[in-house]
Image: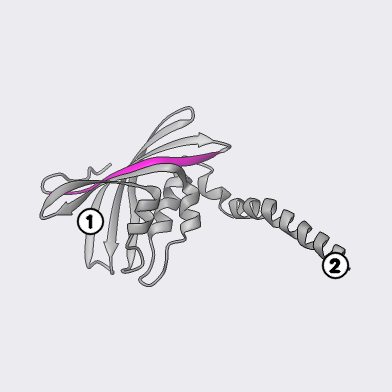
Amino acid sequence: MIQNMHKQIFTLAIFFTFAFPVFAQTSWKSDTETIETTCLNLMRCISINKGDTVDWPRFNNLFLSTARFNFFALEDKDLVLVNKSLEEFKRDASYGKVKFQEVELFKRINQFGKVAQVFQGYKFTVNEGELTRSGINCIQLVENDGRWWIANIAWQPEANRLKVPEK
């Protein structure tokens, strides 16, 4: 009887070890089938209501583990370059402390085989218009294993006389 229980536990352990990652990936497979869906789902992951939390496993699914986040933050009316790893970005993110919604204004895709560069205009609002800003996301993607991965992302908000082009 104890031997049968050990066999059942072993069988379940093997099942969950190999099957669970497949189930987890399958639920987000459509998130990364194309360049367009990958970029769209990036915005969906970070657009959340106050008090909610980002679906970090789904967010991770969009990125290579080595992805870098390079962005310009406004400090005392100057733009300051910030560079973070995926884990640093997630750790320091303030999503959920306010309502944050980001939408795409336009997208230009340059692709050569399994590499792509997306120039994406965005507009975000915080707390129903308390703060609204536009800018440009510059997203590098690679295709591997039948899906697209974000390799790096850089962005810059509008500042002073630098405005986002119409398209």
121 shown above or below 2: above
Location of residue 50 in the rendering, given as x and y in whole percent from the top left corner? 35, 71
* Residue to which mark 2 is pinned: 2
- Magenta stretch prevailing secondary structure: strand
What colour scheme does the image use? one colour
Q: Left or right of 52: which side holds 157? A: left
Residue found at x 18% / y 46%: 163
Res. 78 in view: yes
Question: In this view, which residue lies farthest toward the top?
Answer: 112
Q: Judge by depth and name the residue closer to the eye, 76 or 33.
A: 76
Q: Closer to the camera, 78 or 159?
A: 78
Under mark 2, the amino acid is Ile
Give the left or right position of residue 144, taking residue 84 as reference: right
From the viewer's side, name the closer residue of 44 and 19.
19
Q: Which mark is residue 133?
A: 1
Q: CA distance from mark 1 to mark 2?
A: 64 Å
